[in-house]
């Protein structure tokens, strides 16, 4: 009998992991700077390059595309190889992907600070960078589909469906929303104008949340959570149902970013109802994850990685309930242009993406380096506060949003979102008694 | 007459608050019945307790049996609820898990074939129904307002509030703040005809009251003076105070009208009374 031998490419996983940590520190530090600028204007440093307007997009893009982006590639490159039982299609493509992506990040940060922007949220980069993103994304796609083609498993695991959805949709979104006419190397004009431009932009913007911050992470959840807990996935049926309903419904929800605008009334309503219909498909992912932990809750009490996963999943559940509520125009009329929206984004990007990234890093790095976690106690430390109080503190706006509260909120929440976390994180630890029985 | 009215009102008020009937005997009957009922209830409970204690002594095995039966039923009910709960939640007992495992195996990850929870489906279909109803409400039946209609609605509300405020603001005038306003004179004329003409003449030429068209004034001829005279009256001389009858806005209107009567020289003018005003304030301004 012929025994086939092959090895997984762990080096690329390690590289993406290191990049995730570095860009995480960079992106969140810039976020702190941006938050501090709201209270201490002198932190704009009196130069055009460091003003709030230029630094903020660096923060959002760094966190989404650098921190979360690298985390996606780390998580996908590790799990793809294993659930398909093969090495990545091409090591060269992996390397091009890695270094290309890091170059794009650096180029984006520099050009944004220099003031080159298309002024489309989450798509601020000018056309040369857009082209580079397209090329690198295609490299990732070729590498992934190559791997899928040469797989040794007959069926594709649910995680792979989510990765495929991610690749296909992000490609479509990015290309359609980046169609611009260049007038010079660092200046271009969008082909769409007026309300069409707005609609395309938020179709893109909303589905960046869906297919960059949600589907790849659901895919990773389906691989890492059963591995961490050593439990079978709760329901195969549910995974099919929520996968297809999620990707079908998400695509339509973008117009809820444009309520009370010059966009036709019926398009706005369509965005609202598709947003409300998203609750169940989103929660399908959450409950499939949480129910996978059934019979393993005793492990959750001691394993920091599982705690991080539980926080991530509950944050996901909250964010995907809050989102549909915010998309109702009666709620939106109150919340729009307040820091409630900023808080909502942070529940998603930090609570869901961030915490799952931390969990995967904690689980992966010891395996890659064949070592133990430096200190489990340290890994447990931030959790006590984050997942209990943060939920409350992330939403000072919920309390402060009614009427007269808005002014207080304007002053406070900009910093609340970032600073209150840090304060509680460092100083508030001992005043809260953690009740372990909560998670049993 | 007044006392009678007050008397009936008092009765009506009392009967509103009194629980008892008007008849004293009915009240006694009701109270007695309540006391009897409560006594009966207590007696019944006592008897029941006594019977039970007797039963415990005479037939202990029956009591025990009954208690066991009760316990069994309670357990069965509890299990039924749990089964229903599990069905809604889509949870199968964890011991049955091995029957649910599919033949999938991806890098050691197994998948269970649990059903989709009923509550999940209810939520999903519920939100889809919400979507249809939402669209019908806003775009078919027209019950809900779209943003243009909302805008118009709110503008109409604001306009109404503005009118209310202005109407109220008109009533905020008094003898210190009132100003002559020719636009008010037209409505002032109607008020004058209805209330003032009887004494001051249809054209202000005077009658029982002084002439209002000449340059002689007993209590001042400027708008603020006239407003004050109309409002508080001059009871000694027969001029009625009007502040109870006319609103401040109406007094301002009629005062403005009276200003327009200056030097109109109507027929049958009454002889001059009071001091002559050589120049009104408005005439001084013109210089």
Image: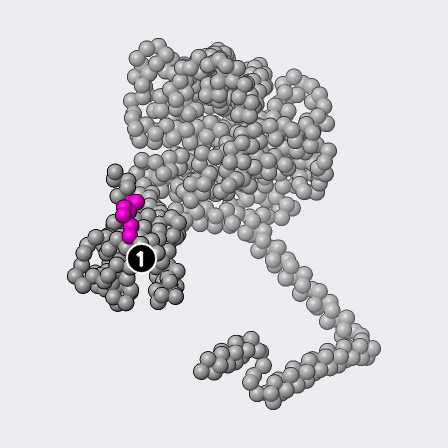
The quadrant of the picture occupied by the N terminus of chain A is top right
Residue A288's place in the image compared with A417, above or below, is below
The x and y percentages for residue A398 are 53, 40
Residue B189's place in the image compared with B144, above or below, is below
Q: Which residue is mark 1?
A: B274
Pick whichever, B31 or A81, lies toward us.
Answer: B31
Chain ID at mark 1: B
The residue depicted at 61 percent of the width and 43 percent of the height is: B97
The residue depicted at 63 percent of the width and 87 percent of the height is: B28
What's drawn in magenta, residue-wise?
A: B276-282
Q: Find residue A328 and report its image quarter.
A: top left
The residue depicted at 31 percent of the width and 14 percent of the height is: A182
Q: Is residue B71 visible?
A: yes
Residue at the extreme right of the image, as rendered: B57
Pick whichever, A302 or A110, lies toward us.
Answer: A110
Q: Is residue B191 visible?
A: no
Task: Identify the image's colour scheme: rainbow, by chain, secondary structure or one colour.
Answer: one colour
The x and y percentages for residue B179 are 33, 48
Question: Magenta segment: does it hold B280?
Answer: yes
Q: Find residue A119 and report its image quarter.
A: top left
Secondary structure, mark 1, is: loop
The residue depicted at 60 percent of the width and 26 percent of the height is: A358
Pick whichever, A379 or A112, lies toward us.
Answer: A112
Pick whichever, A432 or A356, lies toward us.
Answer: A432
Question: Magenta segment: does it hold A331?
Answer: no
How packed mark 1 is, by other alpha carbons closer than 10 Å (few <14, some 14-19, many 20 or more), is few
The quadrant of the picture occupied by the C terminus of chain A is top right
Left or right: where does residue B218 sit relative to residue A360?
left
The x and y percentages for residue A150 are 47, 21
Residue A40's place in the image compared with B84, above or below, is above
């Amino acid at each position: 009998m012929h025994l086939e031998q092959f090895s997984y490419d762990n080096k690329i996983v390690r590289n993406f992991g290191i990049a995730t940590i570095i860009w995480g520190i960079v992106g969140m530090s810039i976020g702190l700077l941006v938050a501090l600028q709201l209270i201490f204007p002198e932190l704009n440093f009196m130069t055009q390059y460091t003003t709030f307007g230029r630094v903020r997009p660096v923060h959002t893009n760094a966190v989404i595309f650098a921190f979360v982006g690298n985390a996606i590639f780390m998580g996908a490159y590790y799990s793809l190889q294993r659930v398909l039982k093969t090495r990545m299609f091409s090591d060269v493509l992996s390397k091009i992907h890695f270094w290309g992506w890091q170059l794009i990040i650096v180029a984006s940060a520099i050009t944004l600070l220099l003031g080159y922007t298309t002024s489309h949220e989450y798509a601020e980069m000018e056309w040369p960078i857009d082209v580079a993103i397209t090329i690198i994304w295609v490299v990732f796609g070729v590498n992934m589909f190559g791997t899928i083609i040469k797989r040794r498993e007959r069926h594709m695991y649910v995680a792979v469906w989510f990765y495929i959805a991610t690749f296909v949709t992000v490609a479509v979104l990015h290309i359609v929303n980046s169609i611009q006419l260049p007038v010079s190397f660092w200046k271009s004009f969008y082909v769409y104008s007026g309300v069409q431009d707005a609609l395309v932009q938020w179709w893109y913007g909303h589905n960046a949340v869906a297919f960059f911050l949600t589907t790849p992470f659901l895919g990773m959840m389906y691989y890492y959570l059963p591995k961490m807990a050593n439990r079978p996935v709760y329901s195969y049926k549910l995974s099919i149902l929520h996968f297809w309903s999620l990707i079908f419904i998400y695509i339509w929800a973008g117009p809820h970013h444009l309520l009370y605008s010059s966009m036709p009334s019926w398009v706005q309503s369509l965005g609202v109802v598709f947003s409300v219909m998203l609750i169940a498909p989103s929660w399908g992912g959450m409950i499939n994850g949480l129910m996978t932990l059934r019979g393993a809750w005793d492990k959750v009490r001691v394993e920091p990685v599982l705690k991080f996963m539980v926080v991530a999943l509950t944050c996901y559940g909250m964010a995907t309930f809050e989102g549909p509520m915010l998309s109702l125009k009666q709620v939106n009329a109150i919340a729009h242009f307040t820091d409630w929206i900023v808080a909502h984004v942070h529940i998603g990007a930090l609570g869901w993406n961030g915490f799952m990234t931390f969990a995967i890093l904690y689980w992966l790095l010891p395996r890659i380096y064949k070592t133990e976690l430096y200190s489990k106690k340290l890994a447990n430390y931030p959790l006590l506060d984050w997942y209990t109080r943060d939920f409350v503190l992330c939403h000072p706006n919920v309390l402060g949003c009614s009427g007269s509260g808005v002014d207080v909120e304007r002053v406070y929440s900009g910093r609340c979102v970032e600073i209150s976390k840090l304060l509680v994180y460092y100083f508030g630890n001992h005043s809260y008694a953690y009740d372990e029985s909560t998670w049993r | 007459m007044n006392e009678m009215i007050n008397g009936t009102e008092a009765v009506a008020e009392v009967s509103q608050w009194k629980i008892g009937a008007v008849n004293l005997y009915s009240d006694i009957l009701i109270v007695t019945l309540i006391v009897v009922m409560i006594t009966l209830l207590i007696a019944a409970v006592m008897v029941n307790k006594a019977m039970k204690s007797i039963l415990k002594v005479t037939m202990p095995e029956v009591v025990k049996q009954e208690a066991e039966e009760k316990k069994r039923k309670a357990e069965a009910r509890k299990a039924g609820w749990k089964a229903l709960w599990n069905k809604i939640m889509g949870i199968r007992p964890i011991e049955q898990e091995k029957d649910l495992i599919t033949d999938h195996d991806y890098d050691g990850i197994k998948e269970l074939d649990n059903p989709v929870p009923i509550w999940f489906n209810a939520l999903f279909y519920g939100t889809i129904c919400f979507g249809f109803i939402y669209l019908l409400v806003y775009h078919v039946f027209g019950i809900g307002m779209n943003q243009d209609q909302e805008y118009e609605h709110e503008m109409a509300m604001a306009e109404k509030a503005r009118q209310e405020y202005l109407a109220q603001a008109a009533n905020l005038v008094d003898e210190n703040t009132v100003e002559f306003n020719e636009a008010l004179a037209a409505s002032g004329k109607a008020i004058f005809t209805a209330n003032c003409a009887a004494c001051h003449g249809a054209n202000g030429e005077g009658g029982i009251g002084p002439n209002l068209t000449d340059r002689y004034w007993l209590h001042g001829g400027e708008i603020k003076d006239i407003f004050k005279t109309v409002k508080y009256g001059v009871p000694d001389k027969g001029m009625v105070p009007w502040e109870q009858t006319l609103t401040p806005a109406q007094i301002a209107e009629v005062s403005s009208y009276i200003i327009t009567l200056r030097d109109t020289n109507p027929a049958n003018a009454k002889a001059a009374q009071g001091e002559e005003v050589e120049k009104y304030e408005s005439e001084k301004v013109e210089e």
